[in-house]
Image: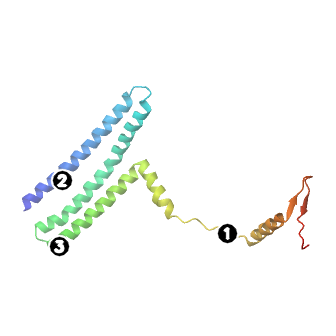
Amino acid sequence: LAAMIYEAISLLYAMEGCTFLLSIALILYARRKLRLMPYDEDRLRSKYQVKEVLLVSMAILPSIIVSVATRTLSLVPTLLWVHGVINYHVCCLAYFMVHSLNCILTKLTLIGCHKGMRQRFQLLFVTKLRTPRKKERDAEKESDEYFEQVNLAWFVERKDGRNERYKTTYS
């Protein structure tokens, strides 16, 4: 069982390493492509797409590092279980807690490192959580404005530019 666990660990690190190297290769390719891109009418659209590949690849690198660190942490309970230090149920509980933490930290790192994702996240979640500050109420100013509006409602502007009070049958 221990040999199989160590094989799985090496496979995990091999996959993470390949992802890391592929991301670096994409960064180098996108930078080279941007530099050598010919100038024509489709250049702006193509340049935007290549630049977005570059930005996402650069944002994924820190996310991969965080993922490797938390996955390494998740191996601790598994190794403790293999060597008989903890029971299986505690191992599963600890492993899945660290795995959930890995998902959260990886996504937050990706959002934090990519400008577009960060702006969208702030637009969708952060600005909606903030409560607007209450303005100080000025009762004197409010009452002055109210009575000014009431007075304006009773005055009619004549053609010669003078204002006169609206005459009712009651006055």
Check the image and report above or below for 167 versus 19.
Answer: below
Q: Which quadrant would residue 42 be assigned to in this image?
A: top left
Report, in whole angstroms, how far the alpha carbon at label 3 lies from the one at label 2: 22 Å
Check the image and report above or below for 66 versus 90.
Answer: above
* Residue annotated with mark 1: 136
Q: In the shown orientation, is residue 6 left or right of residue 168?
A: left
Report, in whole angstroms, how far the alpha carbon at label 1 lies from the one at label 2: 59 Å
Towards the viewer: 111 or 148: 148
Q: How is the image coloured?
A: rainbow
Mark 1: which secondary structure? loop
Disc on the earlier residue, 1 or 2? 2
* Residue annotated with mark 3: 89
Q: Residues within 10 Å of mark 2 (few under 14, many from 20)?
A: some
Which label is found at residue 12? 2
The amino acid on which the numbered mark 2 sits, given as a three-letter code, is: Leu
Report, in whole angstroms, how far the alpha carbon at label 1 lies from the one at label 3: 57 Å
In percent of width and height, residue 68 lies at: 25, 54
The amino acid on which the numbered mark 1 sits, given as a three-letter code, is: Glu
Residue located at (10% from left, 70% from top): 84
Towards the viewer: 37 or 31: 37
In percent of width and height, residue 152 lies at: 83, 63
Q: In the shown orientation, is residue 89 left or right of residue 155?
A: left
Check the image and report above or below for 96 versus 115.
Answer: below
The amino acid on which the numbered mark 3 sits, given as a three-letter code, is: His
Disc on the earlier residue, 1 or 3? 3
Residue located at (62% from left, 68% from top): 134
Q: In the shown orientation, is residue 43 left or right of residue 103?
A: right
In percent of width and height, residue 41 lies at: 44, 27
